[in-house]
Image (cartoon, helix red, strand yellow):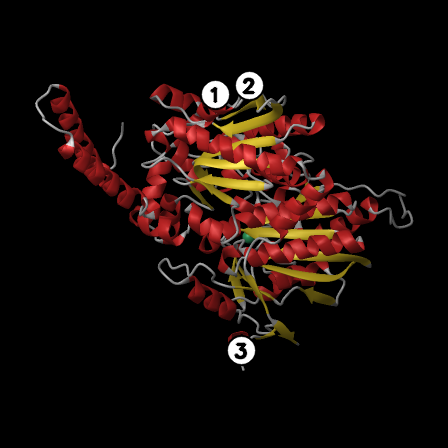
Amino acid sequence: MNWFKRVAQNILTRSKKEIPEGLWNKCPSCNEIIPVKEIEENKYVCPRDGYHFRIGADQYFKLLFDGKHEFLFEEIQPVDVLGFKDKKPYRRRLEEARQKSKASEAVVIARGRIDRIPVVIGCMDFSFIGGSMGTVVGERLKRAMLLCAEEKIPLVVVTKSGGARMQESAFSLMQMAKTAAALSELRKAGVPYIVVLTDPTTGGVTASYAMLGDVHVAEPGALIGFAGPRVIKEAIGKDLPEGFQRSEFLLEHGFVDVIVDRRQLKETLSRLIRILTHKVKKANGNGKETLKAS
Amino acid sequence: MQVFDWEKPVVELEEKLKELYEQFEEGKMADRQAIEAMEAQLAQLKKSLYSNLTPWQRVQMARHPDRPYSLDYIEHIFDDFIELHGDRRFADDKAMVGGPAVLDGKSVMVIGQQKGRTTKERQYRNFGMPNPEGYRKALRLMELAERHGLPVITFIDTPGAAPGIGAEERGQGEAIAYNLLRMSELRVPIVSVVIGEGASGGALGIGVADRFLMMENTWFSVISPESCSSILWRSWDYKEKAAEELKLVPEALLKYGIIDEIIPEPLGGAHRDPDAAYAAVKAALQANLKKLRSQPIDKLTARRKEKYFQMGRYEEKRVVE
Ligand SMILES: [Zn+2]
């Protein structure tokens, strides 16, 4: 029985299917044809020019967790309450996303360890309707935030989203308020919340939990903004400056704390969380635990 | 006054009635019978027209250039008001106004998005589209209210937060996000009223509230019908359809538990009888503030958070490994 049929029968099995991949992949940045294996071994970073490929939640989990991890809140599944229909009915978009995406929704939550420290990671996945935030994204993240507040577990959220899911209209908008209210609880509990901004992070996600981290880590070159570049270009009737709304631009303007190469992401998160939770490892050779951009 | 095509039958009848009035005044008519008949006809027509507006017509009503704006409501509802300027960080945003005010002899803080009426005013107010400093000014006033125990009232009327290079440089997303977080925990009552347009995060940025009210001829949505049409249909021609699909009218939002109350407007919209609109909004604010003031603040903020925690619809399915 495939995944979709099970959902239809109100039973849900985690998808184990692998997207068939070719042996070679073209880097969109330098246009080099590179063996897929080489890209994977390099943590999905182009070995020629450092371009960060867009990857899914399962790949981030493999990169960040020590190994085993337990999925949380997978039972929270989307419904088409409004009967929304544009060129396609929302119901069908959901079915297609379920078939196509490895992720069970646009955010996947899992609990495991980073460098032996227990953490919860919420990771968005662009392959599920453009990583758009509907009720399920807000609800899963809210539950993760409240769980972390309750059990004092650091929370990492990897953002990657085109913004709110229009097909859920006001319900989707309210997820901004829902997650912000849950983060108020997390702050009160004194639990670290680290946001990893990846390409792209825009719209309602930027205007809620993506910009409310204790620390904002960004992957290099990621598009991060509230309004999309096309909208801004239309509004001002001018071309946008080079590098506008990229990680480096946000760092210069004070909205990103540190830009970290994906190959150092796990190590950086580990050091950050250890320092913020007073679990610093015994001093190594030079006796320092400093955080610096790669 | 701007008249929509679909309003023309009303306007034509109103003009005919005016002629009859004049004839009567001049003594050209013996009795008022014809006038009374036409008055009844007009009332009937208005009622059937304005109580059956399509979502897109509602959007048009919300944007009517003669609708009262935030400062109009502030002037006519409150006994005193001192406008305060600036976010103490960068600038004073003219698309966001606010300051302490008096309602029924009690202190409150009132904040609202402000549109302009003339071409010059519209530009001065940036079409009611706040920049980050507008959201930060709003938050500064809310925190001031919190320190002094003033309930917060916000008037929402925006086509969206400003898109622009400066807005992104100064963190439009962060400004809105932080308002959402702080409003969710603010230790004074908050009442928000959509008085015109309530577009997306730009509206929500001053709209996390204990009580969220909408006037009858307003809209509140994750995106404007035009932008929705352009993104989902890849054409600007589906705005009417998008307005329907988005369920952006107050009645739908009340049904889905997104909003708490609808404030009825005078027949034909707030702009046709502003005084009646001010009175309706004032009465709604008084009633809601009275209830909110009597609640212990810890209970109030817990209930506010819980309200937002519950928002949205989803299914819970059994997971089989
Ligand atoms: Zn490359």
Percent from the top left, x then y, of residue A148? 75, 54
Q: Dot 1: what SS?
A: helix
Q: Name the residue nearer the viewer: B32 or B41.
A: B32
On-image quarter of the N terminus of chain A: bottom right
Residue B67 horizontal side relative to residue A20, left or right: left
Q: Residues within 10 Å of mark 1 (few under 14, many from 20)?
A: few
Among the two numbered marks 2 and 1 on one chain, the one whose residue lies closer to the N terminus? 1
Residue A63 visible to an observer of this rendering: yes
Q: Ligand 1 within 8 A of label 1's CB?
A: no
Q: What residue is pinned by disc 3?
A: A9
Q: Which mark is residue B81?
A: 2
Q: Residue at x 60, y 22 (%)?
A: B105
- The lab-note entry on whether marks 2 and 1 share a chain reads yes
Label 3 resides on the chain identified as: A
Residue B278 horizontal side relative to residue B23, left or right: right
Q: Dot 3: what SS?
A: loop
Task: Give the image quarter of residue B34.
Answer: top left
Q: Are marks 2 and 1 in contact (CB under 8 Å)?
A: yes
State the separation of the CA atoms marked 2 and 3: 59 Å
Q: What residue is pinned by disc 1?
A: B75
State the separation of the CA atoms marked 2 and 1: 8 Å
Q: Residue at x 14, y 31 (%)?
A: B16
Q: Which residue type does callout 1 highlight?
A: Glu
Q: Name the residue nearer the viewer: A19 or B99.
A: B99
Percent from the top left, x then y, of residue A271? 79, 48
Q: Dot 2: what SS?
A: strand
- The lab-note entry on whether marks 2 and 3 share a chain reads no
